[in-house]
Amino acid sequence: MTRQRPPDPYNNSICPPTYESASYFFRDAAEVKAHLHTASGRAGRYGRYSNPSWLTVESALTSTMRSEDSLLFASGMAAHTAAFLSHLQKGDQMIIPAESYRMVRRLSKELLPRLGVTVHELSIRDSDRFIHELASLAPKCRLVHLEMPSSPHQYLIDLEQARSVVPKSTLLTIDASFSPPPNFFPSDFGIDLSLYSATKYLGGHGDFVAGVASGRGDAIDKMRDFRDVTGAVASGAIAALLSRSLHTLEMRVDNVNRKASYLAEKLASHSRVRKVYYPGLQDHTHHHLAQRYLSGFGGVITFEIEGDEEQTSTLVDRLKVPYMASNFGAPQTLVEQSTFFTYFEYDDSELDDIGVSRSTIRLAVGFADPLSVIEEDLFEALES
Ligand SMILES: *Cc1c(COP(=O)(O)O)cnc(C)c1O
């Protein structure tokens, strides 16, 4: 006798429904065997392993990223943790850029060594030197992690050279949170796994925290198994929000590319501005790499003013349009004084090491603020 189950009332909605089910039923024992025992079918399982709303967004991400497969995670850090821990074993060595995201550095330098992984940190500031050091260390490493553009200086990496000196058997990962499609497609340059804080541009509305991994099918399979076991999963609602955000990704990114390029140029010619770090500017150290690897330069502009830390705070305090907050890729424009936010625990010599001046400001242009409004506020604050 067939069990009575409520039918799906519609099967033709243009927007896929949001699934928030803790588990999914099987129709009979044969289906249990086919789906649960062989893991070949993804439907009809428990909510930590799969969810139809994840599958929808993961498949959209795969086509957006021009990759083979993708996974959704609870946060960008969960995606990084899964990428590293699912591929590394005790005794392995890995490389990270010295300029990588602060928590990726802590994960690599504090947690991984406790598990028996040796982590080498290489600066990417001098591109030739980085490639040279990479060539000598990479053959010993199981995993090489890259990040570009880096924060706050937006350094880039010569990916073709990096790929050519990293053996095929070494997993090459990249944190591309600052440059999502359509600005940058890491898979096109032989990167095995791209990792994103979907909290930033992919989500794009500053209203949730999530992470994404996208890349080679076999590398993603390992991460899926790790996610099943460790459970850093997002809800169906977050998956649905991210699906919706992907429809506007290109529009939003094009919008901030255009506005930030204009503002970066204008800041660079202002007498109170000492230096602007924006990869689209000709005088950025890695502009030649930006031209090769990026087709847009993003919405984040880092600049230093002529003045000390206190004068920098005065200027930032004077801004009325941006929220003072540590994020980017949101509708709102956000601003942070770097030595008060990300680097507040660093002393002068540590700041010197990473080349961060106390007059550094990071402005993340929001797609919802008209350019003229951001511009007027910024230049009024600079001039008073
Ligand atoms: C925000 C961020 C992360 C971490 O992502 P969460 O979603 O906050 O966990 C990683 N890398 C970069 C470059 C980031 O900006």
Image (spheres, rainbow, N blue to C red):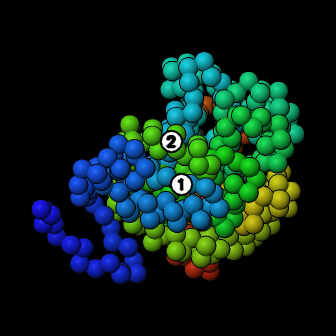
Q: Is residue 35 above or below residue 251?
A: above
Which one is in front, 73 or 314? 73
- Work out which quarter of the rendered image holds the C terminus and state it: bottom right
Q: Along the horizontal axis of the image, is 292 left or right of 40?
A: right
> Where does the image place residue 33, in percent across and percent down from the top left?
31, 46
User: Would you identify the image quadrant in which residue 248 lies?
Assistant: bottom right
Q: Which residue is at 52% across, 74% downward? A: 247
Return the residue nearer the eye: 352 or 20. Answer: 20
Residue at image position (59%, 44%) is 218
Q: Which residue is mark 2?
A: 223
- Distance from Cα at disc 2 to Cα at disc 1: 10 Å
Query: Residue 256's image quarter?
Result: bottom right
Tell me: residue 144, above or below residue 202: above
Look at label 2 and name its amino acid: Met
Tell me which amino acid carries mark 1. Answer: Ser
Give the side of residue 305 with respect to residue 79, left or right. right
Whole-percent x and y of residue 279?
Answer: 76, 58
Q: Is the residue marked by circle 2 packed among few (<14), some (14-19), or many (20+) residues within 10 Å?
A: many
Q: Earlier in the sequence, mark 2 or mark 1?
A: 1
Using the image as rendered, state which of residue 152 and residue 157 is in the foreground.
157
Q: Does dot 1 land on a helix, a strand or a loop?
A: strand
Q: Are marks 2 and 1 in contact (CB under 8 Å)?
A: no
Q: Residue at x 78, y 58 (%)?
A: 293
The N terminus: image quadrant: bottom left
Q: Which residue is mark 1?
A: 70
Please count the marks in the image.
Answer: 2
